[in-house]
Amino acid sequence: MLAAAGNLYGVREGYRRRSDWSKAFARWGSLEVMLIAGAVCVLVGGSILAGVLSYWSSHRFVPLLNVLPAVLGTSLLVIGAQNILGGFLIAIVNGNDADFVRPAPVPAASGSASRSASLIANEVV
């Protein structure tokens, strides 16, 4: 994921040419697609682990003969979390900015007139 983010940043800044795989990744690498894929992986992995837990508890917690379902469920959970967090990383690298910290622009001409009017209104006579 970090290599893809670095490549996309290089293409965006203009010091790398866009390759064939980056064109394909740009279509599938949007935030929405990554969040949906991550959520599906987390849900499938969680359901597999819930099935393993129910099977294990119904057999009185004896050692499991095959750990593949537990490894598969855990792997899907981790891959889903990586997709979710990687989707945010790719969205930030691609230039999707959130304007939470920028102050709202104040018009210069009307700012002084409304300020003087509010000062006059607040004067004590």
Image (cartoon, rainbow, N blue to C red):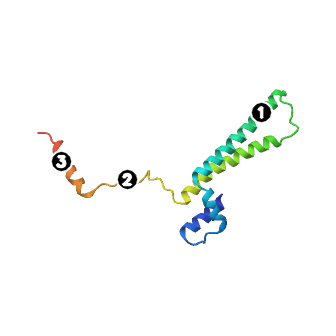
Which disc number belongs to residue 103?
2
Mark 1, mark 2: which one is toward the viewer? 1
Up-down: is 65 above or below 28? above
The residue drawn where x is 63% and y is 64% is 22
Residue that mark 1 sits on? 53
Residue 106 point in image, percent of width and height: 30, 54
First of labels 3, 2 by sequence position: 2
Residue flagged by tag 2: what amino acid is it? Answer: Pro
Residue 108 point in image, percent of width and height: 26, 58
Number of marks in the rendered image: 3
Residue that mark 3 sits on? 117
Asked whether disc 3 touches disc 2, contact meaning CB atoms under 8 Å apart, the reply is no
Q: In this view, does 68 lie to the left or right of 105?
A: right
Residue flagged by tag 3: what amino acid is it? Answer: Ala
Residue 53 point in image, percent of width and height: 77, 33
* Residue 92 vs residue 43, the one in the foreground: 43
Q: Residues within 10 Å of mark 1 (few under 14, many from 20)?
A: some
Q: Name the image quarter holding the N terminus.
A: bottom right
First of labels 1, 3 by sequence position: 1
Q: In this view, does 22 lie to the left or right of 97?
A: right
Q: What element carries label 1?
A: helix
Residue flagged by tag 1: what amino acid is it? Answer: Leu
Q: How far apart are marks 1 and 3 (CA)?
A: 70 Å
* Residue 82 vs residue 121, the one in the foreground: 82
Residue 87 point in image, percent of width and height: 60, 53
First of labels 1, 2 by sequence position: 1
